[in-house]
């Protein structure tokens, strides 16, 4: 049976630590096809079919399962124990310290599942990271920095996973589709230019495609439009700048290439329901 004291449900986030599974039904209850999932096997093994691909996952194997993936357990050992982290697209984008950090974002672009065999020290590191996330999400609601600690612990795991991703040889054989490659390139350019460039046309021209093609492709791969990603990146940059009380609202507006502070304030309030001044005041109250 699934141990109730080791799981956490949040809007867009599920954490399961060292779950002992005794039946296929137990796993089915944990798996959410609308989430990205990161599965780590601690003991035992399972034989799983992901879409039309059959995969054996054993001790110290970590499996990244894309959203909207058909996942069926074909067989499992009697002593199966796993860690599982599942989250939605919105959760990872809203809780990324530096969005979109391409080092781990590639995991969420590809439609293919990816398995990595971990060294003991890497497996222990990821389990520690999962336990850290679990401890933060179990903080009472009254904890003044609960959301912030969840954000940082979640990103810590993603950065650790990104490091393993780049140290492992399996990613060399990972093939992205033409559309996925275009979206990955879009994110790379966006990260470097979101402060100065706010229009889809700039990114389309840089990628040598039409604005319609870029918008359509980003929407198909991520379920969000290119314009949404650009606006979210600008909001994130604004929030980072607003943390520095020495920077005036006018300076931040100019830094982010708005015509004036009023245009910046209207844009920021539209996306956060707070004016830049109100957002800064809330930060200072904490």
Image: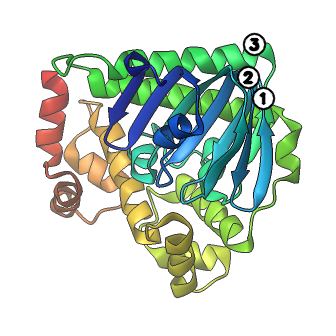
Q: Are marks 1 and 2 in contact (CB under 8 Å)?
A: yes
Q: What element carries label 3?
A: helix
Residue 53 horizontal/vertical position (percent) = 78, 57
Q: Is residue 128 above or below residue 64?
A: above
Residue 20 position by quadrant: top right
Residue at (75% x, 29% y) in the render: 45
The residue beneath circle 1 is 58
Distance (Cα) linking label 1 and label 2: 6 Å
For this view, does 70 lie left or right of residue 238?
right
The answer to whether one can see residue 176 in this image is: yes
Q: How many labels does the image show?
A: 3
Q: Upstream in the sequence, badge 1 or badge 2? A: 2
Residue 157 in picture, x, y percent from top left: 56, 27
Q: Tag 2, which secondary structure?
A: loop
Q: For marks 2 and 3, give the one nearer the viewer.
A: 2
Judge whether 252 appears above or below 140 on screen.
below
Task: In the rendered view, tell whether residue 285 sits above or below residue 189.
Answer: above
Disc 2 designates what residue? 44
Location of residue 144 in the rendering, given as x and y in whole percent from the top left corner: 20, 18
Q: Which mark is residue 121?
A: 3
């Amino acid at each position: 049976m699934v141990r109730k004291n080791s799981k956490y449900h949040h809007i867009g986030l599920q954490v399961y630590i060292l779950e002992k599974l005794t039946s296929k039904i137990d796993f089915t209850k944990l798996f959410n096809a609308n989430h990205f999932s990161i599965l780590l096997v601690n003991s035992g093994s399972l034989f799983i079919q992901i879409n039309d691909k059959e995969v054996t996952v054993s001790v110290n194997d970590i499996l990244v399962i894309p959203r909207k993936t058909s996942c069926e357990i074909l067989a499992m050992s009697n002593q199966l124990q796993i860690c599982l982290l599942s989250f939605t697209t919105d959760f990872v984008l809203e809780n990324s310290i530096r969005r979109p950090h391409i080092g781990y974002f590639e995991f969420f672009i590809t439609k293919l599942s990816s398995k990595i065999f971990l060294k003991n020290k890497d497996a222990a590191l990821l389990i520690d990271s999962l336990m850290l996330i679990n401890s933060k999400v179990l903080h009472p609601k009254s904890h003044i920095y609960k959301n912030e600690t969840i954000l940082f612990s979640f990103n810590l795991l993603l950065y650790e996973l990104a490091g393993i991703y780049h140290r492992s040889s399996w990613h060399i054989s990972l093939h992205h589709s033409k559309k996925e490659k275009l979206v990955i390139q879009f994110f790379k350019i966006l990260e470097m230019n979101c402060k100065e460039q706010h229009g889809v046309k700039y990114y389309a021209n840089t990628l040598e495609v039409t604005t319609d093609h870029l918008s359509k492709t980003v929407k198909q791969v991520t379920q969000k439009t290119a314009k949404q990603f650009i606006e979210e990146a600008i909001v994130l940059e604004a929030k980072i700048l607003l943390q520095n009380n020495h920077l005036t609202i006018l300076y931040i507006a100019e830094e982010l290439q708005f015509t004036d502070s009023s245009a910046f304030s209207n844009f920021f309030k539209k996306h956060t329901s707070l004016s830049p001044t109100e957002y800064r005041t809330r930060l200072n109250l904490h």
